[in-house]
Amino acid sequence: MLTAILSFIIFGIVLINSMFQLREGRDERGRSIMFNPLNLSFALLLVGYAAINIVDTLFHLSFSTYKDGVSILFAGVLIFYIVFLFIERKRLS
């Protein structure tokens, strides 16, 4: 159930990102708006993935728990990315 909900959230965020990229991503301002959130989101994704692996090493998580953790991490980073994208768009407008 959790995976289905997270899949819908991820699909919606990717759709919003694609629409934004079609409208704003053609000029230098649009590239700047997209670059800053992507940098921060990618760094958060790497830190989160490393944290999940450390927790898995220490506590020996089950596969379903590990899978749910990665899904939550991915959805959380994408939500952060979209929120930061809109903040950056408003700041540079």
Image (tube, rainbow, N blue to C red):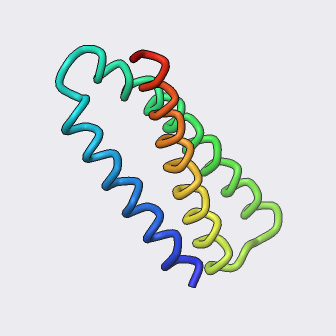
Residue depicted at 38% across the width and 23% down the height: 33
Quadrant of the rendering where the C terminus is positioned: top left
68 relative to 31 in the view: left or right: right
Residue at horizontal 64 percent and vertical 65 percent from the top:
69
Judged left or right of residue 22, residue 20 is right
| The one of 85 and 37 positioned closer to us in this rendering | 85
For the residue pair 71 and 8, the one nearer the viewer reads as: 8
User: Is the residue 1 above or below the residue 81 in the image?
Assistant: below
Q: Position of residue 24 (x, y in %)?
A: 25, 29
Q: Which quadrant, please, contains the N terminus?
A: bottom right
Residue 75 at x, y = what percent?
Answer: 53, 58
Residue drawn where x is 45% and y is 70% of the image: 7
Q: Position of residue 3 (x, y in %)?
A: 53, 77
Specify the farthest residue to the right: 59
Q: Is residue 10 left or right of residue 30?
A: right
Q: Reply above or below: 54 against 11.
A: above
